[in-house]
Image (cartoon, rainbow, N blue to C red):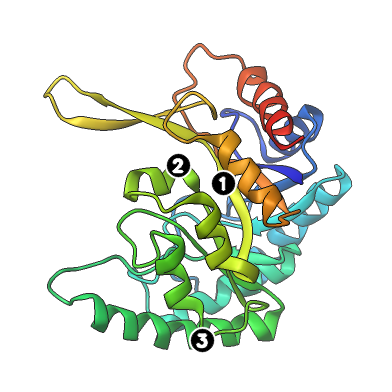
Amino acid sequence: MKFAAQYGLQPGLTFEENVARIRRAGYGGIELSTAGIFEGRARPLAESEMPELCACARDCGDCVRAAGLEIIGLVPPYFALSYFEAPVFENYYRLAQAMGAPAIRVFGMLYDRKQGYHALFRRTQDMLKTLLGYGARYGVRSLLELHPGNLNESCSGACLVMRDFDPKLIGAIHDPQNMVLAGRENWRMGLEILGDYLAYVHCKDSYYARNDQGQWKSIIVHPGEGLVNWKEFAAALKDTGFDGYLCNENRMDKTGVQSEEYLEQELAYLQGICA
């Protein structure tokens, strides 16, 4: 298996410094955001902006490749089927192509009890037909992340959404910590369900604790310190023949924590359980 890190795990660094820090820690890949292209969350991009934005995307890609890292995907923040109409998405596929990213993450449709599952499922499939057309045009695979609250919050839920489409054009980012929050399926069974749709895996962990108001809240921690049985999950990955990327996505509170603890040490942990 291979190991990547999400951009921005070490705050307060420039784009170039972030890329160099991830490479220095020993990772072989990076999952990029739109940082370095524009600031803030995903939004409709005007056609007049695109020449400059695509130039910035190419510069970001060149910086990553010069550092010896592989781009595994582009993850614009809040880039979701629930937030935009399908035409808004095309310019992001153009950015991914300019950057040299093979895939782009799209958050799935949020469940809404007023609309109901079946209506949202039909809308999801209609939108995906358009998005996968963009993906085919620009050579970029669309990835749905397993995420609580979405129609695709589980492996089986994601497979229902994707099964009518070519896995070369669409896939899933597995996230065991997100699945623990949603109510997980058996690790091995879920990986078998996804099959060729599995793109790569996000790595973080969490446990539940009560806040000052007595409410249960999820607390992000280092992999291996929370509710995810990472050794069991890694064994399931190996048993099903997965040889792709595990991507460090740990955005825990890092106040007073040295970066080596969540870059080098977390990489060592992931390498250890995958050995």
Q: What's the residue at 20%, 68% (across, down)?
A: 112
Closest to the observer, 221 or 224: 224
Dot 1: what SS? strand
Q: Return the mark for residue 164.
A: 3
User: Spatial distance from mark 1 to mark 2, Cα to Cα?
Assistant: 8 Å
x and y percentages locating residue 169 in the rendered image: 63, 78
Dot 2: what SS? helix
Left or right of 29? Residue 49 is left
Residue assigned mark 2: 177
Q: Quadrant of the C terminus?
A: top right
x and y percentages locating residue 124 in the rendered image: 38, 80
The answer to which of marks 2 and 3 sits earlier in the sequence is: 3
Q: What's the residue at 12%, 24% (across, down)?
A: 214
Q: Residue furthest top?
A: 256
Residue assigned mark 1: 202
Do callouts 1 and 3 mark residues in contact (Cβ within 8 Å)?
Answer: no
The reply to whether residue 50 is visible in this rendering is no
Label 2 sits on what residue type? Gln
Establish if 176 lies above or below 97.
Answer: above
Establish if 67 lies above or below 267.
Answer: below
Left or right of 245? Residue 107 is left
Do callouts 2 and 3 mark residues in contact (Cβ within 8 Å)?
Answer: no
Occupied quadrant, residue 211? top left
User: Spatial distance from mark 1 to mark 3, Cα to Cα?
Assistant: 25 Å
Closest to the observer, 90 or 52: 90
